[in-house]
Amino acid sequence: MKKIVVGFFGITSLALTSCEGTVDYAGAAESMCKCMTEKDAEPGGDVDLGRDLDYSFCALDVTIEHTLDVTQEGFAAALNEKCADLNDLHKEYLASAGQ
């Protein structure tokens, strides 16, 4: 199920980033950090889907908000600079997206 969701986000990400333009990786990484901080602060409730799925949802939000592909090296470098604690989740996301 998670692979299907991540695959959907990957395809959506590629479709949305086909437009040319200036890419603000630092701003996108900051948005990812903020999104994950908010997800971590949410109460777990009855169903906790896990941080990897939370990361996928945040990746989609960042892709739409900043019109960029979070699988690009520039985003990974900015993410490492802004919130290095998400590096492992980002690597898992890339692996599940076939990157």
Image: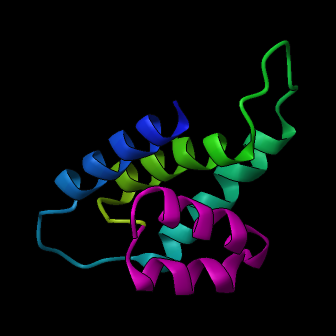
Q: Residue 73: image x %, image y %?
A: 42, 84
Left or right of 13? Residue 60 is right
Vertical position of residue 89 compared to residue 78: above or below: above
Find residue 86 and report its horizontal and vertical position in percent. Answer: 72, 67
Occupied quadrant, residue 80: bottom right
**Numbered range of the magenta stretch:** 71-99
Image vertical order of residue 51 relative to residue 90, above or below: above
In the figure, is residue 14 to the left or right of 71? left
- Is-magenta flag for residue 2? no
**Residue at point 13%, 63% (across, down):** 18
Q: Residue 11 at what x, y percent from top left?
A: 26, 49
- How many marks the image carries: the answer is 0
| Drawn side of residue 10 relative to residue 88, left or right | left
Q: Is residue 50 left or right of residue 80?
A: right
Q: Nearer the viewer, residue 94 or 16?
A: 94
The one of 22 and 98 positioned closer to us in this rendering? 98
Q: Residue at x 53, y 41 (%)?
A: 57
Task: Please state which of residues 54 and 83 is positioned toward the viewer in this rendering.
Answer: 54
* Quadrant holding the C terminus: bottom left
Which residue is drawn at the image coordinates 49% and 52% (left, top)?
A: 59
What percent of the width, then of the height, locates residue 85? 79, 72
The answer to if 97 sits in the magenta stretch is: yes
Q: Nearer the viewer, residue 88 or 96?
A: 96
